[in-house]
Amino acid sequence: MEAVEQGVMIADRFGGTIHFLNVVDVGTEMSASGVGHIADELSKSLEQMADDALTDAESRAEDADVPYERTILEGLPHEATVEYSDGHDIDLIVMGATGQSGIKEHLLGSTTDRVTQSVDSSVLIARP
């Protein structure tokens, strides 16, 4: 949650609005899609985790009296983040240095790396 803290601090200091974005990774959902009921449960679980994370982020913004928007999308995290940024005139993207994908990050490249290579905005990488 260091990225949230940094984002809230910057938005507070410069009078900005923070956009909290959480992308439910359809790649994870798709890998379980052949298992029927398990895929439904996984999808619900991922959506609940996204909702919980954003609820915590909202609390931090409210505590600092920083205006915010909240969005949950489904898709590939790097693609959805880039599309959201392009469509919302985002000045600065604040992301965590590490994600939740574990070994997949090391094999395919991290979401953070892909976003930094694909957006026109500046990107601040917050270390845990």
Image (spheres, helix red, strand yellow):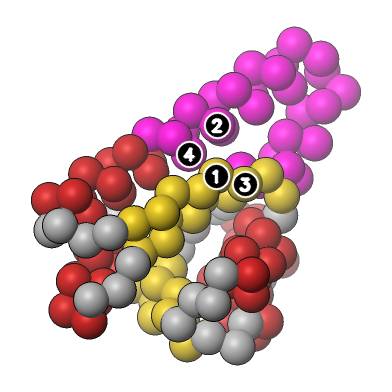
For label 2, the residue is: 47
Marks 4 & 2, CB-CB < 8 Å contact? yes
Residue 104, by quadrant, is: bottom right
Q: Quadrant of residue 88?
A: bottom right
Per the rendered image, the range of residues in magenta is 24-52
| Alpha carbons under labels 3 and 4: distance apart | 9 Å
Q: Residues within 10 Å of mark 3 (few under 14, many from 20)?
A: some
Magenta span: predominant SS is helix
Decide if residue 39 is in sight here.
yes
- Report if the CB atoms under discs 1 and 4 are less than 8 Å apart: yes
Q: Mark 1 points at which residue?
A: 72
Label 3 or label 2, whichever comes before in sequence order: 2
Query: Distance from label 1 to label 4 (Cα)?
Result: 7 Å
The three-letter amino acid code for the residue at tag 4 is Ala
**Picture quarter with the C terminus:** bottom left
First in residue order: circle 3 vs circle 4: 4
